[in-house]
Amino acid sequence: MASLPNQQETITLDTFLRGLWQENPVFVMLLGMCPVLAVTNSAINALAMGLASTFVLVASNSLVSLMRHFIPKQVRIATYIIIIATFVTMVDYAIQAISLELYNALGAFIQLIVVNCMILGRAEAYASKQRLGATIINGLGIGAGFTFALLCLGIVREILGAGSLFGFDLFGDQFQPWVVMILPPGGFFVLGAWLLLFNWLRTRREAKLLETEGAPHDG
Amino acid sequence: MNTTSANNPPLPPTPAFNMLRTLGLVATLSGLLVVLSYQVTLPMIERNKQQAIEKALYKVVPGAVQRKDFVAIEERIELLDTQPEGTLLYAGYDQTGQLKGIALETAAAGYQDVIRLLYGYDPYCQCIRGIQVLKMAETPGIGDKIIKDARFQQNFEALEARMHPSGKGLQQAIVPVKQGNKTEAWQIDAISGATISSNAVARMLNETSQHMVPIIMKNLPIMEQF
Ligand SMILES: Cc1cc2nc3c(=O)[nH]c(=O)nc-3n(C[C@H](O)[C@H](O)[C@H](O)COP(=O)(O)O)c2cc1C
């Protein structure tokens, strides 16, 4: 991972933006694929999952960062897991209190946030070494990147597979939905398409960079 | 990536106390937060559950605007006051306290997973007046037609579930038939292409009604007084 391993990061705009783009947990690091594929069959599920994961990420990593001098290496994984599981349980109750319909739609995937490697990975690689401020900003960035990626999938899958967006009908009765898109295979198709697009954009940008920098040598 | 352990002199061993202190502290904090959020959200979650039942009840019992909960214990029906030990029955009444119907929960295995639904039973026409899916994971576009297909829903405008004259079971079992072949009031016109889901609905309505309709009919006076 590119983020400075052992020195304190000073907060810049990049602390936040990195998670959204260069280190996007889904499109670049391919972390947390289980909810990415499973709960993106509608935009609202994707948004709810993204926000819930962001909350758990920021809250648990903040606590890890605050306690970083008091967590001996030997018990760190156990400590992180307890902290993460605590916040997941709180989110679980909160979603039940907000809407049972949403809770039923997200099913077991709320509880499974506990084992989302994006969150444990951030605790281990970032929060355990960085100050609270940087951890919060970086966590918000990663969370925003995760939510953005889930929405990318959820929006496309709901439009193609159900002809609606956030539950609002888009095309009227004449539309014949492409049902496979909201079924599990559709998750793989749409994820593949997005990865293709983002990788193509990246190679193109890198090729351009090479062209401008490397021009004298090539000449 | 982290090569410090190879280059630096070994760190002094961590005292056991430090490990216990951290884990103990975190576990205590975790306990406090979990219990606190449970306590705070419990009334809201209970309210949501009640609202969900009420919303479904008023849909499957046409004309109902108030409800009273009962519980069936073996052959008796009682007003629900404490912990339910039998089958729950939600009776729906109109403005004047007139009994409009009774809603029951039922479930059976569908194509993907168990389908759970609430259905409304009208003891005066001895028929089922509506179904409302509480939980299911049927395939969108296929199995979820049991909710979305208006023609399928028409089955439950007055689906006959008459008590057998002997007081045991139904006079006619509720059965599914292939799409377009419904001729009798106790038949369910299945959805072609979603036969498994349709059959599951028919099966659960039949099973629960075979058992519960005689009990309801025998205990009707208790539920009639609002
Ligand atoms: C991916 C997939 C999902 C399906 N989902 C359902 C379903 O949810 N409910 C259902 O009754 N049938 C479902 N089916 C179809 C059943 O396997 C079966 O073909 C159908 O119920 C038969 O209906 P018919 O006898 O009217 O042709 C599904 C089939 C496939 C391939």
Image (cartoon, coloured by chain):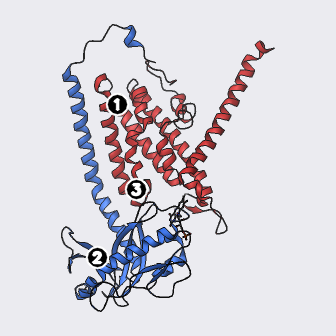
Chain colours: A red, B blue
Of the pair B174 and A11, the residue shown nearer to us: B174
- Mark 2 or 1: in front is 2
Residue A69, given in percent of the width and then of the height, sits at 31, 22
- The residue lying furthest to the right in this view is A219
Left or right: B172, with B177 as reference point: left
* Residue B91 visible in image: no
* Residue at disc 2, secondary structure: strand
Give the CA separation, mark 3 to mark 2: 25 Å
Amino acid carrying mark 2 in the image: Leu
Tell me if mark 1 has few (under 14), some (14-19) or many (20+) residues whose alpha carbon lies within 10 angstroms of its own.
Answer: many
Dot 1 falls on which chain?
A
Of the pair B162 and B120, the residue shown nearer to us: B162
Residue on which the image places disc 1: A64
Say which mark, if any, is on residue B224.
none
Can marks 1 and 3 be said to lie on one chain?
yes
- The residue lying furthest to the bottom in this view is B165
Residue A85, given in percent of the width and then of the height, sits at 33, 41
Residue A33, given in percent of the width and then of the height, sits at 49, 41
Looking at the image, residue B80 lies above or below residue A80: below
- Mark 3 or 2: in front is 2
Of the pair B210 and A141, the residue shown nearer to us: B210
Give the CA separation, mark 1 to mark 3: 28 Å
* Residue at disc 3, secondary structure: helix
Say which mark, if any, is on residue B89.
2
Q: Quadrant of residue B163?
A: bottom left
Looking at the image, residue B54 lies above or below residue A127: below
Amino acid carrying mark 3 in the image: Tyr
Residue B96, given in percent of the width and then of the height, sits at 32, 88
Dot 3 falls on which chain?
A
